[in-house]
Image: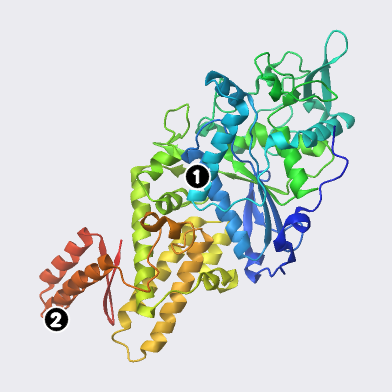
């Protein structure tokens, strides 16, 4: 019934990149990340030199994805991309929960086969990830494909004395198996809960923010597996490792085990799959903040009780809020990804979702999307103007080949500060301002070749920083998206940009003449009119430059 072999090293067994030499940047020495278990930011040191193993809890594919779900995917995609830019070889595992009560119940209510419903919505999630530029995981295992791993893990927990099988009046196993919390003195270490005490103040912050994304039932903060409410439990804190089927469960949603027919509890799948693909101990376990308790607390306990090391560091992305409340289906504020993309470009949506540090609550509003669109206009405007001035763009190979050690220091410092995206974005726009100033000097400077070299260096830095955040407009998926997400490569000036350039240049010349004539009222009027139209004017020694706000 179980697996006879231990999991192989996934990188050396199936990953072609395992043959590529690893060159970790010196910048990696400054990386500091928050750990949920310690409540502290600390220096990151990988368990294996040059390699990082990350497991992120993926979707329960019961229905369509919404912005609250995808925020976590974008947040950890940025974390992953920073590790890659630092030169690490990253094994990134993101699971799919394709069997649970919600899937079974919703499929039955809709007259569907449960596995068909799960696969349909799994594809919707994949489409959302791809559209928003989230890198595909190294491996994306489904729960239903790892039953033998879960059964083996449960058996180890039982053998180690940290679980128990519920039997019927005849002493036969019922299919219900529980983790014995009282037998595990370390329970509560992730969320700083003691065996007999309430959660402490720091760990309670998340609970006060609002309900889980997919909250159902009476417990709006942590949806309870129906099996966890069973009177067969020895202790109210015990949780289901395996559970007997409900009478309404279809026959193909039941698996035979040494402890009875049934299906897995919610928590066991992640312990089994993280160990299958990342081995004995790995660097980072990630997920949304609402998974911190009980899911990750229980997962940590059962993994260690089975005799395996847990993740060295736990990272949790905060929620998307709407008017201060957590976005969730139960609150009626959930926004589906397709509906948001129908009104905004994918680049703009990704920018808005990744605009703040992963641990910060993200307030979702029309204003956030307006600001993201303005950011896109500024970025694409500079990239296009620089490309025209240079007669072409740096290649994608040049952009991706830039090491973290060669990026602007303020960008690196921000990313190394627990992936502070806000600071990193500020560094990008500081560099764009410098680039716009250089562009204005090209026609006035005798050493135009030297200035062109500076423009090219600046353009390469801007695109490399954007690429680190998954936002280089000349990369996929934005290029294929065309007007929905890409910028011109600059080899030819678009008619729209040419017209805008001519109109604004005329206004700048008129403003310059007004200032020369000391008609400052007229000069200010021209500046204010351009500002109202979304044009920012910057005055310098070599003249005035413009950019879109």
Residue shown at 55% from the left, 71% from the top: 397
Which x, y percent locates residue 483?
A: 36, 57
The local secondary structure at tag 1 comes to helix
Dot 1 alpha-carbon crowd within 10 angstroms: few under 14, some 14 to 19, many 20 or more: many
> Between residues 478 and 178, which one lies in front from this camera angle?
478
Which x, y percent locates residue 190?
A: 69, 39
Indicate left or right for 306 with 134 as reference.
right
User: What is the quadrant of residue 160 in the picture?
Assistant: top right
User: Which label belongs to residue 56?
Assistant: none
Which callout, 1 or 2, points at the residue further toward the start of the chain?
A: 1
Which x, y percent locates residue 262?
A: 75, 22
Q: CA distance from mark 1 to mark 2?
A: 54 Å
Locate the C terminus and report the quarter of the image it occupies.
Answer: bottom left
User: What is the quadrant of residue 168 in the picture?
Assistant: top right
Residue sticking out furthest to the top: 169
Write down the residue under mark 1.
Answer: 128
The local secondary structure at tag 2 comes to helix
Write down the residue under mark 2.
Answer: 516
Answer yes or no: is residue 219 visible: no
Residue shown at 33% from the left, 56% from the top: 374
> Between residues 333 and 315, which one lies in front from this camera angle?
333
Indicate left or right for 475 with 2 as reference.
left
Indicate left or right for 126 with 312 as reference.
left
261 above or below 489? above
């Amino acid at each position: 019934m179980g697996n006879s072999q231990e999991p192989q090293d996934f990188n050396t067994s199936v990953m072609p990149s395992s043959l590529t030499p690893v060159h970790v940047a010196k910048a990696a020495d400054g990386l500091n990340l928050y750990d949920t278990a310690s409540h502290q930011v600390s220096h990151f040191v990988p368990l294996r030199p040059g390699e990082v193993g990350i497991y992120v809890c993926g979707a329960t594919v019961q229905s369509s994805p919404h912005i609250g779900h995808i925020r976590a995917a974008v947040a950890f995609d940025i974390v992953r991309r920073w590790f890659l830019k630092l030169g690490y070889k990253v094994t990134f595992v993101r699971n799919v929960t394709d069997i649970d009560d919600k899937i079974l119940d919703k499929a039955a209510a809709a007259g569907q086969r449960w596995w068909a419903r799960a696969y349909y919505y799994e594809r919707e999630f994949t489409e959302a990830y791809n559209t928003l530029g989230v890198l595909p995981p190294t491996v994306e295992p489904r729960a239903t494909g790892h039953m033998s791993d879960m059964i083996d893990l449960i058996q180890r927990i039982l053998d180690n004395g940290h679980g128990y099988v519920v039997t019927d009046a005849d002493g036969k196993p019922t299919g219900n198996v529980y983790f014995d919390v009282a037998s595990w003195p370390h329970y509560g270490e992730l969320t700083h809960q003691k065996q007999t005490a309430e959660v402490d103040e720091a760990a309670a912050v998340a609970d006060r923010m609002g309900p889980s994304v997919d909250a159902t039932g009476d417990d709006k903060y942590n949806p309870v597996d129906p099996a966890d409410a069973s009177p067969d439990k020895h202790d109210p804190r015990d949780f289901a490792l395996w559970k007997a089927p409900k009478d309404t469960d279809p026959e193909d949603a039941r698996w035979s085990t040494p402890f009875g027919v049934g299906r897995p509890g919610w928590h066991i799948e992640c312990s089994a799959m993280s160990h299958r693909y990342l081995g004995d101990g790995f660097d980072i376990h990630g997920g949304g903040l609402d998974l911190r308790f009980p899911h990750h607390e229980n997962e940590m306990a059962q993994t260690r009780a089975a005799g395996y090391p847990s993740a060295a560091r736990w990272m949790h992305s905060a929620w998307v809020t709407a008017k201060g409340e957590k976005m969730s289906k139960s609150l009626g504020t959930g926004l589906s990804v397709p509906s948001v993309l129908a009104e905004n470009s994918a680049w703009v949506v990704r920018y808005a979702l990744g605009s703040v540090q992963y641990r910060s609550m993200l307030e979702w509003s029309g204003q956030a999307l307006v600001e993201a669109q303005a950011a896109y206009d500024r970025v694409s405007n500079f990239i296009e103007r620089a490309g025209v001035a240079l007669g072409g763009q740096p290649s994608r190979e040049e952009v991706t080949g830039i090491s973290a050690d060669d990026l602007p220091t303020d960008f690196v410092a921000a990313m190394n500060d627990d992936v502070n995206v806000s600071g990193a974005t500020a560094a990008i726009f500081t560099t764009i301002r410098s680039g716009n100033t250089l562009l204005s000097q090209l026609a006035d400077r005798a050493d135009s070749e030297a200035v062109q070299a500076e423009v090219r260096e600046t353009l390469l830095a801007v695109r490399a920083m954007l690429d680190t955040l998954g936002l280089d407009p000349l990369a996929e998926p934005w290029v294929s998206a065309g007007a929905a997400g890409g910028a011109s490569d600059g080899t030819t000036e678009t008619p729209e940009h040419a017209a805008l350039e001519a109109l604004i240049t005329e206004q700048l010349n008129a403003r310059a003449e007004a200032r020369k004539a000391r008609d400052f009222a007229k000069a200010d009027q021209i500046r204010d009119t351009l500002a109202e139209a979304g044009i920012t004017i910057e005055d310098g020694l070599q003249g005035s430059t413009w950019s879109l706000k």
